[in-house]
Image: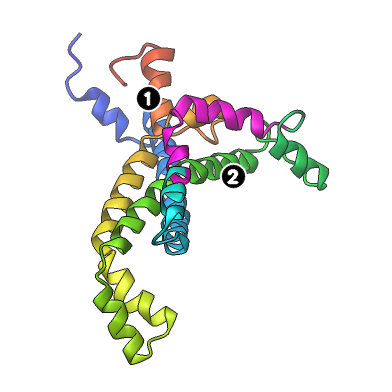
Amino acid sequence: FWNGTGWFKELLDPSSDLGGRVRDSLGRNLAFSAIILAIEVPLGIAVALAMPREGWKVAATLVLMAMPLLVPWNVVGTIWQVFARGDIGLLGYTINRLGIDYNYVADPLAAWITIIVMDVWHWTSLVALLCYAGLKSIPDAYYQAARIDGASRWAVFRFIQLPKMRRVLIIAVLLRFMDSFMIYTEPFVVTGGGPGNSTTFLSIELVKLALGQFDLGKA
């Protein structure tokens, strides 16, 4: 049947069931993306600065950094689903042995922390590799001038390295925002959107509408 703009009106109405669900899941998505960017971008820069610049260690480090990026999303979710379990998972068992009540299945905060740490482990390498490429493109003349002027390590980073990495960082932020905003597989495998709806992001909400309830009009 012809519904016109009815679904869009309901979508934009936060008092409706559809509008409320979309508003809540969109808020979770934006919060997740903001947290991910706040962690991964500075951490990626720090890792890139610590990576070797010459010798055989460069190739070994690049291969090591690229390994998490080769793992498929569903496998990442499965790995962390087992890794974070309190009974058989190394992470969950260790945290519980320290006297911390950790259960990502029942505690929303633990679920959020697990998903954030999982994403940081999976995708910080991308930011680090992009920043490393930006650092390698800086001519040695800049560093020679800084040594002659007696610039400190912080001054070199602030006035040489960071400005030269600006374009690379813009690309890294855009890529990570897009990837984090459309995240689906990892939280779906680890928590299924729970406990409750605490990790139900926009993509999971869409799949629930389209495939779970077969409500294609709203979806």
Residue drawn at x 67%, y 37% is 107
Furthest residue toward top:
1
Which circle marks residue 99 in the picture? none
Dot 1: element: helix
**Displayed quadrant of residue 138:** bottom left
Q: Residue at label 1?
A: 206
Furthest residue toward front:
56
User: Which one is earlier in the sequence, the residue at label 1 or at label 2?
Assistant: 2
Residue 17 appearing in the image:
no
Residue type of the residue flagged with mark 2: Ile
Residue 74 appearing in the image:
yes
Which stretch is magenta?
A: 64-85
Magenta-drawn stretch contains 121: no
Is residue 68 toward the left or the right of residue 117 in the image? left
Q: Is residue 54 above or below residue 151?
A: above
Q: Residue at label 2?
A: 113
